[in-house]
Image: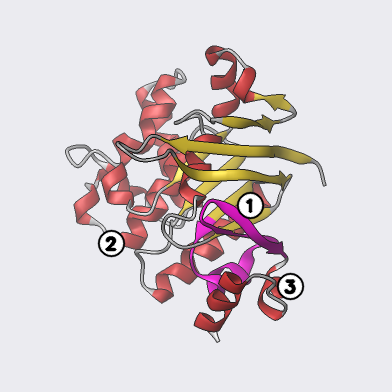
Amino acid sequence: MKEIITVNNLTKYFKAHGKADTAAVDNVSFSLHDGETLALVGESGSGKSTIARLLTGLIKATDGNIRIYDKDICKMKKNKALELYSQIQMVFQNPAESFNPRKTLGYGIGESLKNRGYNSGATANKVAELLEMCGLPAEIALKYPHQVSGGQCQRAAIARALAVEPKILICDEATSSLDVTVQKQIIELLDKLRKSKNLSIIFICHNLALVQQFCDRVIVLYDGKIVDQGTPDEIINNPQAAYTKLLVDSIL
């Protein structure tokens, strides 16, 4: 399969007052293939969310390079890099916090459409289409974030991410605040969208049991470093690192 993201020797240091710089990501290399779901698994502080921020241009790398569609975004001018970043959208852990609480969900989903030149009628129609695609009725567009369930709000967040027709979704703990039944439903939705929209997904979480259900490959991170990688079955049946064994033991 074609590599659409290639990360080589990626390192990110953060300044610490009065202390040595901290390596949040330490010499990490991996790739994401076209149509693949890749899991980044690790505890809080393992570096997985920092990698997401690096991939989306929210922060700059200290060292290494990131190639998206074979173009090194670390060396590109900002306006050129933005064109590539538009191919990547994020879905966050707490969807209600990513929407403006004073605006309806439909407004939040439609913002990027209006920025792309859609008029009001076309925006409303597209928002309804996106909501339906994500398993929600069109009238959800009239609701505010606090008026819907966590699962409904996350579906709306996925609909918003799809509005700009990205090729890559980065789901950063997108199911961790939901109950088990809703987690399964969101995973099924993501997998359906991956197939129907030919998406590639980076799924960031700390739960190997979820990863096993729908991810093609797994990268295990600990203290900013990759300590294990393979298919879900390889990771679960033959963990190489001590930390991976702890993760496996927690789901058995």
Between discs 3 and 1, the one toward the N terminus: 1
Residue beneath the point at 36% across and 67% down: 178
- Decide if residue 28 is in sight here: yes
- State which tag comes first along the sequence, 2 or 1: 2
Front-most of residues 187 and 152: 187
Crowd tier of the residue under label 2, counting other residues whose Cα lies within 10 Å: few below 14, some 14–19, many 20 or above: few
Q: Amino acid at mark 2?
A: Ser
Badge 3 is on which residue?
234
Q: Is residue 205 magenta?
A: yes
Q: Position of residue 176 (x, y in %)?
A: 40, 64
Amino acid beneath label 3: Glu
Q: Residue furthest bottom?
A: 252
Name which residue lies at 63% across and 52% down: 194
Residues marked 3 and 1 touching at CB (< 8 Å): no
Residue 252, given in percent of the width and then of the height, sits at 55, 87
Residue range of the region highlighted in magenta in the rendering:
204-230
| Residue topped by disc 2 | 149
Q: Based on the displayed image, in which of its 4 quarters is residue 231 positioned?
A: bottom right
Indicate which disc, 2 or 3, sits on the residue closer to the N terminus: 2
- The residue at 34%/64% (across/down) is 177
150 to 47, vertically: above or below:
below
